[in-house]
Image (cartoon, rainbow, N blue to C red):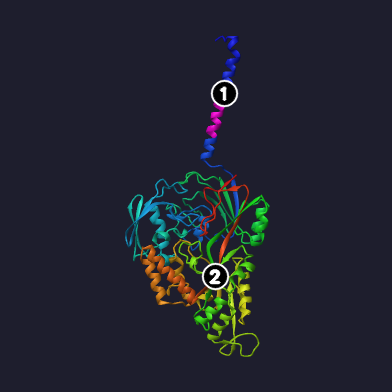
Amino acid sequence: MKINKKLKVPFLVLILIASTVAGSLCIEQDTQKQSSLGSGGHLNCALAFGPSDTLDPVSKWVGWYVREAGLYETLFSYDENMVLQPELASGYEKISDTEWKITLRKGVKFHDGTVMDADAVIYSLNRVLDSENARKSEYDFIESITKDSEYSITIRTKYPYAPTIASLTDPIMSIVSPKAEDLQNKPVGTGPFKFKSYTRDVSISLERFDDYWNGVPKLSSIDVYYVTDGMTRLFKLESGEVDLITGVPQSEIATLQSSEDYEVFTKETLRSYFLYVNMKKEPFSDRNFRQALNYALDRQEIVDIALERIGGTPAKGVLPSVSEWSVNDQLEVIQRNETKAKELLSQAGLEDTDNDGWLEYNGKDFEINIVTYTNRPQLKPSAEVIETQFESIGLKTRVTTMESSAIEADMSNGNYDLALYAWVVAPTGDPDYFFSKHFHSNGTEALKTGYSNPQVDKWITAARQTTDEDLRREYYNNVQWQILEDCPEIFVFYQNAMDATSSKVGGFKQYPNEITIITKDVYLK
């Protein structure tokens, strides 16, 4: 066809315009496609704790570590404000005092492509109820789990158990693929990231799960390094080797905050630091003596010295203020009172008969041994400040650090005086988790302290069995007040989480129960 010379230039311009428009449309479509798949990028992070000999969430506390990495999820979970929300479930209905019907979320796939349904959920939960599971006793309240339909199950309990739904947020209840052949070494969950490889005690590598039910994750891959030393984690952040670290050393917070290259995150957690008291031996069996120890503590001084004023807040009672069940709004921090402490020690039979500055008991030299472990850097310096405070009122004291497994064995055998520990006191949001273990006379931790108060047992049992929230709150308030009187455990401070990222990381949030770290919303700017 012959082209008119007068139309030649305009025609070429039209072609160029059309090409440009088409090209821009392609670019726009590619951009939209890329956006739908997330912004991409590889994240390196260094965490203080991680799995060791297995990656199976059903094993002891491993579920915490593999959930933190974004591998696994549970039927229900808590957001960053500790508000209960459905996760792999879409909702629940209380059918009776002992029946809970749970509706499952549709359209959820495991990393191996298997569809999550009622059979998969029942398979996963029954793994926890297996007689060989070390934590089975925590779920003995469950009588049966049955399938109602492809996306509905019913959990029946042996007796009314109000925290049933809350208990399903524990990472041990992670939902796993029933087709996975080796969950110890190759985890298969529903989380935003799927497993690539693991080097024991060193690192775990993950990649984005494009079929994630809650939207495509923004990162393309992650390497999680397990680094126990806080300063080493910090050096890795400052050198650019990692982009996110947990557990920033307290002494380095101000330096990071002064730099535009980093963002520091701090938040009160549900982790309490407290002293177990061995009530099975004298004079620790005397409430006057235990209360004397309580009044001997200067909690603010412990926070100022051991935590450098930023690592925590002085404890008022059992539960930190971040828990909706705490009675801290009705309490003041117990202030150190040397006069009262000495009066109570005298009533408990401790005297300085030889005027050497140290108290004796039953005419014999008396010394307190505080045992603690080294996994958490706040423990040893805190114990050493407590040592000084006890000695200032005449109680000769020493601090011994041991492996936690050795301490556990000694405590079970009643072979200790005081043990300084750190617990997340309400990881499932509900007080029953901690109160039943620590203050009910047949609880695993109460057996270590020797604590038994029939009235406390009644309150805990009643709170567990009623779904009336006002009544439950009244019972738990009573328990907390009574524990402050009886002092089977002496609460010292609540820990603040202190994490940091490079300035190029976005979407990171802190969770008070310490169960979640990596989510689909974390991204690189």
Instruction: Give the residue at x 60% y 56%.
Output: 499
Look at the magenta stretch and give its main secondary structure.
Answer: helix
**The N terminus is located in which quarter?**
top right
Label number found at residue 333: 2
Residue 188, labelled with which disc? Answer: none
Image quadrant holding the C terminus, namely: top right
**Residue segment shown in magenta:** 20-30
Q: What residue type is labelled 2?
A: Val
| Label 1: element kind | helix
Query: What amino acid does circle 1 point to?
Result: Ser
Q: Is residue 50 above or below residue 437?
A: above
Residue 140 visible at all:
no
Residues at discs 2 and 1 in contact (Cβ within 8 Å): no
Residue 150 x, y percent position in the rendering: 35, 49
Q: Where is residue 341 in the image (x, y as percent from the top left)?
A: 56, 80
For the point 60% across and 51% down, the residue is: 44
Residue at (51% x, 52% y) in the render: 70
Q: What element carries label 2?
A: loop
**Residue 384 position within the rendered picture, expressed as x and y whole percent measured from the top left:** 63, 73
Q: Which residue is drawn at 61% across and 14% down?
A: 9
Q: Which of marks 2 and 1 is in front?
A: 2
Mark before the other along the chain sequence, 2 or 1: 1
Q: Report crowding for label 1: few under 14, some 14 to 19, many 20 or more residues within 10 A (C-alpha).
A: few
Q: Is residue 21 magenta?
A: yes
Where 251 falls versus 420 (above or below)? above
Q: Mark 1 points at which residue?
A: 19
Instruction: Say whether residue 476 is left or right of residue 247.
Output: left
Q: Please tell me which residue lies in front, 515 or 123.
A: 515
Q: Which residue is more in the foreground, 507 or 377?
A: 507
